[in-house]
Amino acid sequence: MLLCWLGVAAMAQVLVGQHARYQPARPIYRAQDLFLDLLGEGRTLVARVLWFKADLYHEQQDAAGVDAFQQKEVIPLLRMVTYLDPTFADAYDVIAYDLQEGYGQTRAAVDLVDEGLLYNPRSYALNFRRALLAEKQLDPIRSYIFARRAFSSPDQDANQFLTLKVLRRATLRMRDARSGLEVVELMKGMGLPDPDPELTEIWRRELQGKGVKIGSPPPG
């Protein structure tokens, strides 16, 4: 009995160690996190005030003849907006545009938009921006995926015409018949003409030669 008891005790020690090993890491709690918690629901109001301040500063600098990408105080203000209110998709979008177009920091812009999409997965602005960034990175597959999400976004400011242009460029670079035909059908659904009927027919014959029924959903 004593040996059994010692064996159980030894096994318990092993299991305790394994249990601790697989526990999720405790989040790092920073001083700024405590400050944000103290703001409570007021965080959203503060975010709106900072957004207004950044917009006002931008207008003042424009009036003074300062180039948009030299207005370096704007990005920190907008970044604080995203910390205070992660659902503020427009702030993420503006920062990403400045990072990529003004400073050539495409990777940083991608990371920022990806962060914004965690909180705003159906945002038209962020999905469209992500599609454009993927295009800059010569990644037509991701460009197509995010542009397709942007096209399906419920946002009222969604510009499906611009999104279709990105989708069309992505399918041409991918040389994928299925997605190419899908975009053609989307264009027709919006009353737009087929930009290349000859290519569309080639795509149709290609899929038929593979035994794929036209209009069938993609596998998976």
Image (spheres, grey):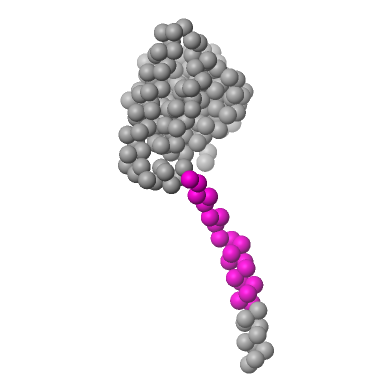
Q: Where is residue 44 in the image (x, y as percent from the top left)?
A: 34, 36
Quarter of image, res 88: top left
Asked whether, in this view, residue 5 is left or right of residue 214, the answer is: right
Q: Is residue 73 left or right of residue 14?
A: left
Q: Main secondary structure of the magenta part?
A: helix
Q: Residue at x 60, y 28 (%)?
A: 107
Question: As rendered, which of 125 and 149 lies closer to the eye?
Answer: 125
Is 12 on the left or on the right of 157, as rendered? right
Residue 178 in the image, given as x and y percentages of width and height: 53, 28
Total numbered badges shown on the rendered structure: 0
Residue 162 visible: yes
Determine if residue 148 is in view. Answer: no
Query: Which image quarter is the N terminus in?
Result: bottom right
The answer to whether residue 185 is magenta is no
Q: Residue at x 52, y 32 (%)?
A: 112
Q: Residue at x 38, y 28 (%)?
A: 50
Question: For this rendering, which residue is in front, 171 or 130?
Answer: 130
Q: Is residue 103 left or right of residue 38?
A: right
The x, y position of residue 206, in whole percent, is: 58, 25
Q: Which residue lies furthest to the bottom in this view?
A: 1
Q: Quadrant of residue 153?
A: top left
Residue found 55% across the figure and 29% down from its top: 110
User: Which range is magenta?
Assistant: 11-31
> Is residue 12 inside the magenta stretch?
yes
Above/below status of 32 relative to 148 = below
